[in-house]
Structures are given as structure tokens and as C-alpha cells.
Amino acid sequence: MDAYPALSTTPRRLLMGPGPSNVHPRVLAAMATPLVGHLDPAFLEIMNRTRDLLRFVFQTENELTLPIAGTGSAGMEAALCNLLEEGDEILIAVNGYFGDRLSEMAVRCRARLRRLEVPWGEVFRPEQVEEALREHPPKVLAMVHAETSTGALQPVEEMVQLAHAHGALFLLDTVTSLGGVPVEVDRWGVDACYSGTQKCLSCPPGLAPITFSTAAREALRNRRASVQSWYLDLGLIQQYWGQERIYHHTAPISMNYALYEALRLIHEEGLAARFARHQLNAEALWAGLEAMGLELFVPLEYRLPTLNTVRIPEGVSDARVRGRLLNEHGIEIGGGLGELKGRIWRIGLMGYSSSGENVLQFLAALERVLRAEGLRLLPGAGARAAADVLERGAAS
Amino acid sequence: MDAYPALSTTPRRLLMGPGPSNVHPRVLAAMATPLVGHLDPAFLEIMNRTRDLLRFVFQTENELTLPIAGTGSAGMEAALCNLLEEGDEILIAVNGYFGDRLSEMAVRCRARLRRLEVPWGEVFRPEQVEEALREHPPKVLAMVHAETSTGALQPVEEMVQLAHAHGALFLLDTVTSLGGVPVEVDRWGVDACYSGTQKCLSCPPGLAPITFSTAAREALRNRRASVQSWYLDLGLIQQYWGQERIYHHTAPISMNYALYEALRLIHEEGLAARFARHQLNAEALWAGLEAMGLELFVPLEYRLPTLNTVRIPEGVSDARVRGRLLNEHGIEIGGGLGELKGRIWRIGLMGYSSSGENVLQFLAALERVLRAEGLRLLPGAGARAAADVLERGAAS
């Protein structure tokens, strides 16, 4: 047996977990483009266009808008370590796993951390946040827009107004929302916002788009000490992505090619059409799951369409169901994280993975697996309910 | 005009700068492999094989051997911020731009920095290093194996012995050496060693292979405080790459595919044959440049074969020559960095870019450009001298 077999032996998967999502063939082809150098005029052009397109998806005019050369968590760390220095206070609204991660990182930036919490799966109300801000105004208020661990979508606009009214910068995690649901950085007034490429942008993981408002850049300029990470120092990175073109680190050329192509696809589709597609396919999935007697984890009013969570029916083995979906049907979905481990499944409908066909294929596969696991289900009920929603959507 | 043209309009380049180098077609094809999830059993297999192959190129049995999800500078920062904490002393031997970068990062880790310096382009002698170690033994002695800014190759083995004799850990930057010249982590006793994928491994930029010895892991375990970077925390990353498989951040799947394929190519070629190829092609280049009357920057005894530096002839415009090579001949070479800006050219012969054909093509192009710039050169002298070396190499 070959100890190091070729990658062509890698199985094909329908990626409907929490990310990565499936990547459009045009983006895969972009990754195979022969490289030019990171200071080649042809690459600098692609960088400029990528910045333009990132501003388009973030809906911002922010000058400091670029992809960090790491995955989404590198974007999170970049946002925090550029804004925070020793002793700065940050208020983090925690309603899931990634709020915890923000907290962990903020502490490593030597910030003073205050956490505001609601149970996982819920979202924050303005009154709660206002009270916490009034108690002691922090330098930064941070929130997760779309909690990948729970499937809850946090309304943001009013939160930004509250933060600003109390003199705080507003930091937003849009890892699972950008490109799938509206993220309006300028209209909402968000000061620092980051995402990952492997979710609704439907590009392979490896880059973290980030954008900083004028106020956030001002805070960066007024720091007393250097950013503790040289690699993630936005002042230095901006000198490479901006007019100066000063070499910082070697940009990941092929990943930038992929991101450029993924953003071109979003630009061609249009943001409104893209958001409507994500919403419709999610509604079809919800209808299908409910018709199968399953219970969605997040109430409709703040349910995220890109990452969908459903309670695991009693008596059903989490690992076995996910294993059969993967091995018998080639479909990946996610298990619960942290305190939701074993209690929910996470079903992603992001970017290229968000299609009516995928919803129907998944529901049919899930039905077969659950029936094989002993659940009594009406044959085809899930797929029929989903198809109804898709048909109504196509007609409207 | 299309504001966002397709990537197929990107020019083809022969990459003979300081990196990225040209990428083998098999590696480009690997990047276009459809993705699986970062916890998919099929991906975990590829991770295991990649670790094996990284151990092969690092010539180590180190358990902690993996690719950091960022470019070479992320590897540098990971090595430093995992080993150093506030107040720790580090002695850094600086003989070029990347020694400066190590220093800058060490300070951001709040370490106490001592620098040992020789002029750029030179290497350190054991006596100098021993004296500095004896003066005040540091926690870590750090050096650059192959200075990308100067083209000097630092002999390492004796340095490691000195560090250990004085109770210090030895940290080595092998960004421009790994896969091109011998790097023998275990035999030399190096404690922490990192590289980048885009140089002699001939993979696109985006990952930073790193390896830690048992002693370095011990230092990591005995830290008083958490590593200041969550993203680069090797203890956490190792839990994902090791047996535990605990999710840390989403691995850059496609970049890992590329690295796996690039390492397979190295394994097929064999390390000894690969080092001999790099040496031969570099010697051909040196002979060609000298036959053209150009002066190599680094003395033969510690001249690096992967990144070759040559003095810019008097009266010749650095920018214009490099511009013509790029625009008229499609060849990228590098200019000088820092204090060597405008004084030298940097010519990479790394990985897939290191071939006799490329040497001859480059010498012919350089001759044409320099003649067009008014230099009087004997036609074909460079290429002939290089071809002689290549022929002798092929015969032996």
C-alpha cells in the first residue's frame, strides 16, 4: 500500500456542516492559477480589486479593509489585539462558543474583561446591554453577529448606537453571516468587523477579511504600546495593502486568488439575491425538519439561515447519525460545540452549499438514516414540505 | 472594461525572486481538489501523512511537528511567543533583515532582548557566540539559517552545542533553507525550527511548518502564563494535530492539500538528490554571473545555493533592470532589503524553480537587459559558463 497516496483518492463530500462549505468550481480553478510574486504589479492589481469587493460585501467605504493571512480566528485575534492594550476594558456579550473564544483572546491581550451572558441559543436585548454599558463604559463592546455554535442571529444596529452613546467602539464577529445575511458595516456604524472565507463566502478556509472604521483606526494610531502580534499588526499590514506597498509578510497568493474569484461570484449574483437565496433555502430546510417531527433549536424571530440548529431526537445517537450521513451519503453536518455537544446538530447552508437541491438531498438522507436508527417517520414528508417552500419561493 | 477581470488574465512568470518560487503543476492541481471538512476522517489521514512528511524534511522524530496556519512570519512568531514570556532573555544573532524581524517580534513578546551582530552578508563564528552566551546565558539563542536578505548560510551544528552547554534552547529560522539545503533538526539538536511553504518546498505561501524538540515542549509546558497569541498557541494547535483531535481553528484545507502534494514530490525526489540539484544549479548560476563580470555578494565558503545575491554593477538602475526582466522576459528577481536596497539583486533557485533551464534562461535575459542598459558584455559568456557547470554536474 502506498504510504502517501495521491489526493485524487479524497472522497467527495456535500459540506453542510458549520464550515468549510462547498467551494464553487470557479474558485477551485482559481486556486490552480500559476503564481506571480507578492509584489508583482499584476498581484497588486488583484489586491486592489479584492479590497474593492470586500468593501462591497461588508457594505463599507472603510479604507482599512483587507484579508488577514489566517483563518477566521486570526481575524478575531487581529481585531482584538489591535484595539486592546494592557488594562483596556472590553465588554463581551457571550451567548455561545465564539463569545467564549473572544473572551479568552481578550484576556491574552491583557485587557480587563467583563462578560455579559444569556443562555446559549438566545440573543441580547438592548436594555441588558445598555445597563452593562452604563455601569461601566468599556473601550470596546464586542458581539457575535451569527453564533456558529447555536444558530442565533443577533440584531446589531441598536447595539452599535448604545455602544457609541457610551463612548465605546463596537466590534462584530461576522464569520458565519458575511455574504449570507445582511452585514451593513457603515449604515450600522460597526467599528471593527471580521469574518472567515470558508463560510458564506464559499472560499476555502485560510483568510479572514477584516474592516476598521475611522474611529477604530484612530484608536489604533493612539495606542501607547505596539500591537503584541507583529504578524497581525494592522498598521503594518495596511502599509502593504495600501498605497505604500511596503513588504510585511509574503501574502498567501493562491488563497487571495480564491478569495478574489469567490467575491467576483458574489458580485455577479448581487447581495440582495444572495441573501434571499440563503433565506429561502433555510426556510425550506426548517419546514422539512419540522415536517419530520424534529424541533429547531432557535426561535424563528432570531433564527440564522446560514447555520441551522436542530435538537437531536431522544434516544438517537449523535455520532452514529453523523457517521452514517458522512459514510453512507457523503454528507457532512456538524455536532454541537461545548455545552450543546450531543444535544443539537448544526446544518450549514452557506454560499455554494445553499441550494434547494442540497436541502432536498440532505432531508432524504437524514430520513433514511433516522429510519434505519429506528425512528418512525412518514416517508417523504420532510422533502415534500421543503419542496413546497422552494416552489412558492421560485414563484414569488 | 471589466472592473473585475478573470484570473486567467494573470501573466505567467518565472519566479526567481526570494519567494514565492514556482509551484509544480501537481501542487497547483492539488489546490483545486474539492474540499472535505477539517474534522473529516479523510482529512485527519492527510494531516497524519503531512506530519510524517514534515518530519522527513526536518529530519526529526519530534512529536510536535505541524504546519502553522499562516505564512513564514507566523511560524517565526509562533516559535517566539510559545517559548518566550515576559522578562525571559533571548539572544538573537542578527546578520540581516530577518534577524531584525526576530528581534522586533521578541520585544513584542515582552522578552529581554540581546542582539549579537555582524555585518549583513557575514555569518557568526562560534567564538563570538560563546562569548555572548558566557556573558549572560539566555533562555533562548535564536539564529537564521539562511538569511533571505543576504544569501548567507550560517553553519549551525556547533552553535547548538554552545547554546546547550550554556543551558539555552536553540531556535532556528529555516524559511529559505528547508527542502533546499540540509536541515538536520535531530542530529544538530535544534529545539525550535520553523519554515515557510513558498520557498524551497515550492508550495504556495500560506503555511509555516514548525517543529519543537522535547526540551522546547517542556519549556512550553512550564510556562507561568498563557501564550499571548491564542491563534498561535502550540499547546492548543497540537491538540488538534495530535491524538485528541480537539477543534482549535478551521484548518486551511486547500493549503494543506498543497503542502501534502509538495512534500510527496520531495519524498519522491529524495533529500540528497534535491540538495544536490539545488547546489549544482546555484553553482551554474554563480559561474554564469561571474563570467558576465558580476560580483557575488557572499564569499563562497558560506554562500547559500537557494537565494543568490549579486552586486548591482555601478551605473546600472536597479529598478529598471528588474522591471525589464519582469516585463520583457517574464522573470521575477528580488531587489535588496533594508540596507542592501539598491546594492544587490536576489536571485532565488528554490524548489521547482531550481532547474538548469531556468538558470540559462535567466542568464540570457539578464545579458540582454544589461546590454540594453549600456553594459559591454561578451555575448553568451554567462550562459556558456553555466552550461559547462551543468554538463560537468550531469556527467558526475
Image: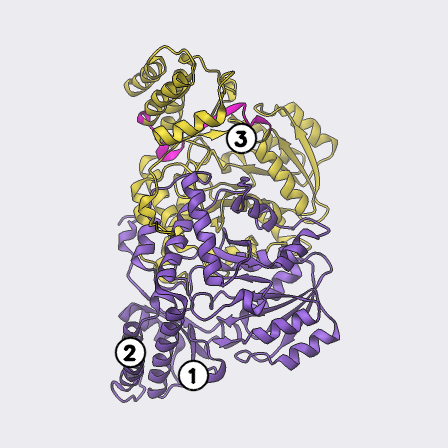
Chain colours: A yellow, B purple
The answer to if A195 sits in the magenta stretch is no
Q: What residue type is labelled 3?
A: Ser
The location of residue A246, given as percent across then percent down, is 49, 63
The tag on residue B296 is 1
Quarter of the image that includes the C terminus of chain A: top left
The tag on residue B394 is 2
The location of residue B287, given as percent across then percent down, is 35, 84
The answer to if A352 sits in the magenta stretch is yes
**B63 displayed left or right of B383:** right
Viewer-proximal residue among A352 and B75: B75
The CA span between labels 2 and 1 is 24 Å
The tag on residue A12 is none
User: Mark 2 belongs to which subunit?
Assistant: B
Task: Specify the quadrant of the image occupied by residue A168.
Answer: top right
The CA span between labels 1 and 3 is 57 Å
The residue at 42%/18% (across/down) is A373
Q: What residue type is labelled 2?
A: Ala
Q: Do the residues labelled 1 and 3 touch (CB within 8 Å)?
A: no
Q: What stretch is highlighted in magenta?
A: A339-357
Task: Specify the quadrant of the image occupied by residue A57.
Answer: top left
Mark 3 residue crowding within 10 angstroms, few (<14) / some (14–19) / many (20+): many
Q: Can residue A348 be seen in this view?
A: no
User: Mark 3 belongs to which subunit?
Assistant: A
Q: Mark 3 points at which residue?
A: A149
Q: Which element is circle 1 on?
A: loop
Mark 1 residue crowding within 10 angstroms, few (<14) / some (14–19) / many (20+): many
Work out whether B200 lies above or below A7: below
